[in-house]
Amino acid sequence: MTNKPATQNGFTNKEILMMLLHGQENLNNRIDQLHEKVNSKMSRQELMGWITAFAVLTAAMMSFFRS
């Protein structure tokens, strides 16, 4: 018999903890990648803001040149 305590699946508590920490690190990296991908795209609200600003500027210029 071995001296190290093992759970029913043959892993020690330290080995299971290391596997969990490794899995958590992978999840955190994936979340960071997705966060960067989402932040790189223009939101619907930002798009509507630019369209509104362009429409107001165009209307103001047309009003100015018609006078």
Image (cartoon, rainbow, N blue to C red):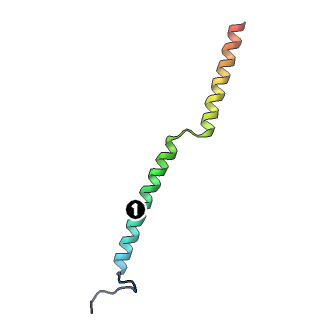
**Residue at horizontal 64%, vertical 26%?**
53
* Quadrant of the frame with the N terminus: bottom left
* Dot 1 alpha-carbon crowd within 10 angstroms: few under 14, some 14 to 19, many 20 or more: few
The mark tally for this picture is 1
**Residue at horizontal 33%, vertical 87%?**
5
Secondary structure of the residue carrying numbered label 1: helix
**Residue at horizontal 41%, vertical 56%?**
29
**Along the line of sight, which residue is nearer the eye, 57 or 10?**
10
Q: Quadrant of residue 67?
A: top right
Q: Position of residue 25 (x, y in %)?
A: 40, 62
Farthest residue to the bottom: give it: 1
**Residue at horizontal 63%, vertical 32%?**
49
Query: In the image, is residue 34 above or below residue 7?
Result: above
Q: Quadrant of residue 55?
A: top right
The residue that label 1 is drawn on is 25
Locate residue 40 relative to residue 1 in the image: left or right: right
